[in-house]
Image: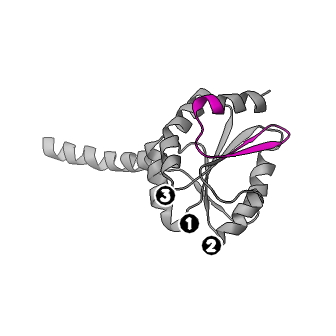
C-alpha cells in the first residue's frame, strides 16, 4: 500500500515538475526585419534598455549576473535582451538566461540569416561589436554603447532616461 501511494505521488508530481521547468523557459521572440520597429512601437513613451549579446561573447556572458541584479533593482525599467545567435542556439540561449534568472525579461533572438541587415536596422552606425547596449528615454532618444559597462555606468544612464 505504501509503495502504491508513493508511485501515485510521483505520477502526480511529474506534471508539476514539468510545468515548473517550462515556466523557467524564456520566450525567445524571432528577431526578423521589422522587429526593431515593433519593439519601438511596443515601448512608445516608455524608457527602456536594449542589450545586444551573444553566447560566443565572453564579456556578454560575464555581464549577465550584473544585468540580473539591475533588473531586480529597477523592476519598472523595461529590459529587452537580443541574442545575435541564430535559432540553432536556442537551447544554449535558454540555458544562459535561466542560469542568470533573465527569463522574465523580454528576450529576442536573430531569426534571419542576414544578420548584417538586422544589425543595420537597429543602428546603421554600429559595426557589430558586442556587447552593445542602447538606452532609450521615453521620447526614444537613444544612446548606444559598445563594450562592457559597470554598475555605475548603468546607473548614470538610468538617471538620464528615467527623468
Check the image and report above or below for 55 versus 148: below
Q: Which mark identifies residue 113?
A: 2
Q: Is residue 10 magenta?
A: no
Q: Which residue is mark 3?
A: 56
Closest to the observer, 6 or 69: 69
Whichever of callouts 3 and 2 sits on the residue coming sooner in the sequence is 3
What is the spatial separation of the Cα atoms under label 1 and label 2, in whole angstroms? Answer: 8 Å
Residue 93 visible in the displayed image? yes
**Percent position (x, y) of residue 113?**
62, 73
Is residue 1 visible in the rendered structure shown here?
Answer: no
Instruction: Locate residue 138, reporting x and y percent.
Output: 82, 37
- Callout 1: few (<14), some (14-19), or many (20+) C-alpha neighbours within 10 Å? some
Q: CA distance from mark 3 to mark 2?
A: 17 Å
Residue at figure coordinates x 66%, y 72% from the top left? 114
- Foreground: 15 or 30? 30
Binning the other alpha carbons within 10 Å of mark 3 as few (below 14), some (14 to 19) or many (20 upward) gives: few
Is residue 140 a member of the stretch shown in magenta? yes
- Front position in the image: 131 or 6: 131
What label sits on residue 122 in the rendered view? none
| Mark carried by residue 86 | 1
Q: Nearer the viewer, residue 121 or 106?
A: 121
Residue numbers of the magenta segment: 133-153
* Mark 2 secondary-structure assignment: loop
Work out which quarter of the rendered image holds the C terminus and state it.
top right
Labelled pair 3, 1 in contact (Cβ < 8 Å): no
Badge 3 or badge 1: first in the primary sequence: 3
Which of the two marks, 3 or 1, is nearer to us in this view?
A: 3
Q: Secondary structure at mark 1?
A: loop
Question: Relative to residue 142, is residue 56 depicted above or below?
Answer: below
- Asked if labels 2 and 1 touch by Cβ distance under 8 angstroms, the answer is yes
Amino acid at each position: 500500500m505504501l509503495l502504491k501511494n508513493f508511485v501515485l505521488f510521483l505520477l502526480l508530481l511529474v506534471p508539476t515538475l514539468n510545468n515548473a521547468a517550462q515556466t523557467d523557459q524564456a520566450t525567445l521572440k524571432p528577431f526578423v526585419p521589422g522587429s526593431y520597429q515593433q519593439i519601438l512601437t511596443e515601448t512608445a513613451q516608455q524608457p527602456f534598455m536594449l542589450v545586444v549579446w551573444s553566447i560566443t561573447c565572453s564579456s556578454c556572458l560575464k555581464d549577465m549576473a550584473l544585468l540580473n541584479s539591475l533588473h531586480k533593482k529597477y523592476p519598472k525599467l523595461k529590459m529587452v535582451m537580443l541574442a545575435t545567435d541564430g535559432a540553432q542556439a536556442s537551447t544554449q540561449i535558454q540555458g544562459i538566461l535561466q542560469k542568470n534568472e533573465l527569463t522574465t525579461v523580454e528576450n529576442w533572438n536573430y531569426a534571419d540569416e542576414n544578420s548584417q541587415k538586422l544589425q543595420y536596422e537597429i543602428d546603421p552606425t554600429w559595426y557589430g561589436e558586442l556587447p552593445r547596449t542602447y538606452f532609450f528615454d521615453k521620447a526614444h532618444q537613444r544612446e548606444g554603447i559598445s563594450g562592457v559597462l559597470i554598475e555605475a555606468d548603468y546607473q548614470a544612464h538610468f538617471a538620464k532616461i528615467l527623468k
